[in-house]
Amino acid sequence: MKIKDWPAAERPREKLLAKGAGALSDAELLAIFLRVGLPGVSAVDLARGLLSEFGGLRALLEVDREQFCRARGLGDAKFVQLQAALEMARRHLAEVVQQGSALCSPAAVRDYLAMQLRHRRREVFCCLYLDTQHRVITFEELFEGTLNAASVYPREVVQAALYRGAAAVILAHNHPSGVSEPSQADIWITERLVQALELVDVKVLDHLIVGEGRALSFAEQGLL
C-alpha cells in the first residue's frame, strides 16, 4: 500500500503537522527526507531498510559520500540535500548559542559542540571563547590528533584566548571511541589549562567530552 493510501493519522507528513516532529520515528523522519520510495517499496519501508543497512540514523547521517551513494534509493542529490540540512542545523544551534550567555543555555552549548564534534573520526580539541558576559565570541578548532589522542599545548590555547579577547572559555574535545569518560591525560591537561589561563585572567567554565550519548561535563563531575 502506498503512503498516500494510509490513514491520514499514520502518514508521516500529516503526523508531523498534527503532533510535531518529535512524535515521528527515525524511519518516518527519514521517509519525509526521502520523499519517495522505490517501485513496490514505500518511502517508510525504504527508510527502515536504510536504517537497518547502516545501523541507525546517526550512522546514516555521518557516512561518507561514496558509501551513502552506493545505497539503494540514494545518490548525489540526496547526499547534497542531507549535507545542507545538517549544516543548517549546525548554524541554527550556533545562532542559539551566540544569542545569550552560554551559562543560560548549557543544553544548547552541549548540542552545538556535540554536533560539531560527534561525527569526527579523529580526536579534535576545540575552544568556545566567551566575553565578560559569557556571550560567545567565536568557536575554534585548535588541535587535531589521531583516533584516540590529540596533543594540546597550553601556550597556544592562552595565545588564542588573548587574541580573541576572551574573558572565559569552554573547552571541548571528542572521543571517537564513543566513551565519554575522561582519561587521566584529559584530567591532567585540563588542570594545566586552568592554571595557564588563570595567569591571564581567563576562566575555564567547563570542559566537555563528546562521545556517545550526552556530553560529559567536567564542571558537573566536580573536576574543575
Image: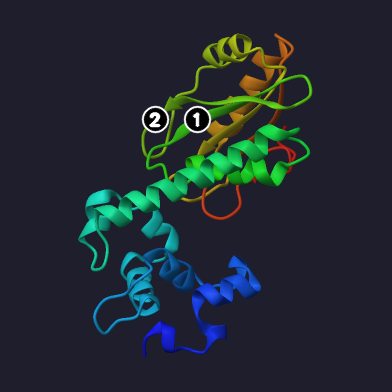
Report the front residue among 77 and 113.
Answer: 77
- Say whether residue 66 is visible: yes
Vertical order, 161 against 102 (above or below): above
Q: Residue at x 40, y 77 (%)?
A: 44
Badge 1 vs badge 2, beta-carbon distance below 8 Å: yes
Of the numbered discs in the image, which one, if any, rests on residue 125? 1
Kind of residue indicated by mark 1: Phe
Q: Residue at x 52, y 13 (%)?
A: 156
Kind of residue indicated by mark 2: Gly
Q: Quadrant of the C terminus?
A: top right
Q: Residue at x 27, y 62 (%)?
A: 74
**Numbered label tally:** 2
- Say whether residue 177 is visible: no
Does 39 sit left or right of 33 as displayed?
A: left
In the image, residue 181 lies at what x, y percent?
Answer: 57, 46
Specify few, some or many for label 2: CA neighbours under 10 Å numbering under 14, 14-19, or 20 or more.
some
Residue 42 occupies quadrant: bottom left
C-alpha distance separating marks 1 and 2: 8 Å
Does 122 sit left or right of 178 as displayed?
A: left
Report the front residue among 74 and 171.
Answer: 74
Report the front residue among 57 and 88.
Answer: 88
Of the numbered discs in the image, which one, if any, rests on residue 76? none
Which residue position holds label 2?
Answer: 145
Q: Quadrant of the N terminus?
A: bottom left
In the image, residue 157 lies at what x, y percent?
Answer: 56, 17
| Secondary structure at numbered mark 2 | loop
Does 78 sit left or right of 216 as displayed?
A: left
Specify few, some or many for label 1: CA neighbours under 10 Å numbering under 14, 14-19, or 20 or more.
many
Report the front residue among 137 and 185.
Answer: 137
Does 166 sit left or right of 152 as displayed?
A: right
